Structure formats: structure tokens, C-alpha cells
Image (spheres, rainbow, N blue to C red):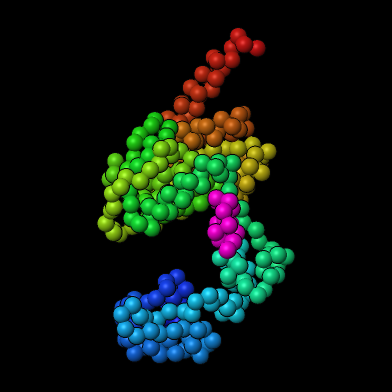
Amino acid sequence: MKIDRLLGILSVLLQKETATAPELAEQFEVSRRTINRDVEALCKAGIPVMTRQGAGGGISIMENYKFNRALLTSTEMRDILAGLRGLDSINGTNRYGQLMEKLSAGSSDFLTGGQSVLIDLSSWYKESLAPKIELLQQAIDNRLEVCFCYFSPNGESERTIEPFYLLFRWSSWYVWGYCRLRGDFRMFKLNRMDGLRLSGRTFPARAVPLPGSGSSAVFPGAVKARILFDAVCKWRLMEEYGPESFREQPDGRLLFERSFRNREYLVTWLMGFRDKALLLGPEDVQQELLEAFQKVKERYEGTV
């Protein structure tokens, strides 16, 4: 559609100082004549698009031009600004705040009391997370391999990955990339990474599957568990997994069925419920849970 192409061209010109008609024609799969007509349409819409002939010439937007928010509805603008505030909360910089000022120029209410949605993506590990996020963004943008030491329930290992996506999921930050050690795509939690650094090597473009929403899609070998919880645990199940995660039984207990990323996490999570949870399966995890409680009992015997 023409309107989609016009917005696409405007986005390119806002990000680049100059673009040529052949470049735009190839990117949007239209003729140069169509691009020229699109440039005329943008000018008629009040956007100061300039064209320069000769070497070093091309199509550009007049210097110091600020984006006219009239191209977006007030609701769309508020959603954009809420997202930008969330990005600034990651590292405490004002980089996205400066972009907010450009987007909302001439309408200070967007920057003050006009916002009803506030997004804070920061964490207790902000000081260590911010440099990792910055480095990974650089690596993704420039297709650079990264190396790091990774800590997991199975121990420590040195990893080299081709990073493709940064994700904020399950209240934590992750990177999705192709792991050289495993020969497959894996999800890595940033808080478990140490010594993150660029390897100095680039990697070629490849088809990248998007990380799925289910735990089995990003954590191979996920453990499917069936658990009965006492009714007093409902608030916690609601908070962590939502109302669809359990079914209330005739005796008031809650039947919970879900796949977990690994056995270690499942056992640790269940121990936090003490005697308010009964693991129905799998049997090998039942045994591991019994052994864990026995070791805790042995450790405290004779100390109280």
C-alpha cells in the first residue's frame, strides 16, 4: 500500500542523512519513478524532503527538522513514549528521552502529566546488566560474535554465540543466539553471564528462528510436572503463572500442570512451598525432591 511505503520512506530518511532513489526503489521494490512521486507526496504533506543531484547527492530531510507528531494519533504517541521510557529504564541514560523530545516537540503534555502507562524494565542488577545490554546491542547490529562464561545448574562453561535478539521475558533479560558449543540456537540469561566480550570475529547472515513463547522452545529438555497445591498457594500461582495454570479440585486443592526449564529449577521452586505442595510426577523428580529435603534435615540436625 502507498501509505505504508510513504511511512517506510520517511522512516529511512529520518534515520539516514541521505538515501538515493535507486536504493529506495530496490528496498521497496518499486520503480525510481514511483519513488519520485512518493517524494512529491511527502513534500505536499508538509515534510521538507530535499533532493540533490550529482556526486554525494540524493534524497534527504532538511537539517534540524523535527518529526511532526500529527502523523500519529495521541494514543499512538503515548504508547511510543511509554515504550521509550521503558528502554531508558534499562541503563539509566537519557538517550531515548532525547528521542522522546524530538517526537513530542511542541506538545509538552506528552512529557509530563499526559502519560498513564509507565514501564520500568530495570532490575536489582542494573549496574552489571547495562554494560552487557550495550555490548550485545553492538554485537547484534554489527553481526559480531560474543564470548562469555556461562553459569547453569550443570556447571560453568565457556560459550561463543552469534547473538540475534535481546529479550525481556519472565522478569529477566536474555539473549537469543546460535551457540557454537551446542550447534543450535539457545537462550542465555544475562545475569548468568560473566566476562562478556566481543570475539573480534563477524558471522554471516543466517535464517534465524524466533524464540518461542513456551519453555520447551527455548529450554531443551523441559520437565513436565503435575503438582497439587494447597488452596493457600493460589495467590502465588496467580502471580507467577496466571489463573489458567491450575484447576481447582473438589477438595479445594489446586492441580497445576506445566513444563519447567529444568529439574534444578523445578526442585528449588517446589522447596519454597514447603509442605503446601505435592509433586505427582515425574517420579524421578519426586525422588530428587525427597533427597533434597533429607539433606536439609541432616544439615540442621543437632544445630537446634
* Residue 235 horizontal side relative to residue 175, left or right: right
In this picture, which residue range is highlighted in magenta? 83-98
Please report the residue visible at 46 percent of the width from the left and 26 percent of the height from the top.
Answer: 287
Query: Which quadrant of the figure has residue 51?
Result: bottom left
Q: Nearer the viewer, residue 285 or 191?
A: 191
Query: In the rendered image of this protein, does residue 262 appear above or below residue 299?
Result: below
Residue that lies at the very extreme toward the right in this rendered image: 113
Based on the picture, tell me whether residue 266 belongs to the magenta stretch: no
* Residue 164 horizontal side relative to residue 203, left or right: right
Query: In the rendered image of this protein, does residue 277 appear above or below residue 141?
Result: above
Residue 250 visible in this rendered orientation of the protein: no
Q: Nearer the viewer, residue 251 or 32?
A: 32
**What predominant SS class does the magenta segment belong to?**
helix
Q: Nearer the viewer, residue 73 or 64?
A: 64
Q: In the rendering, at what x and y percent does residue 6 appear?
A: 45, 82
Q: Nearer the viewer, residue 282 or 118?
A: 118
Query: In the rendered image of this protein, does residue 194 appear above or below residue 30?
Result: above
Based on the picture, tell me whether residue 84 belongs to the magenta stretch: yes
Please report the residue visible at 43 percent of the width from the left and 86 percent of the height from the top.
Answer: 39
Residue that lies at the very extreme toward the front in this rendered image: 55
Q: Quadrant of the N terminus?
A: bottom left
Q: Quadrant of the C terminus?
A: top right
Q: In the rendering, at what x and y percent does residue 298 appear?
A: 54, 14
Q: In the rendering, at what x and y percent does residue 223 appear?
A: 43, 40
Q: In the rendering, at what x and y percent does residue 278 appear?
A: 56, 33
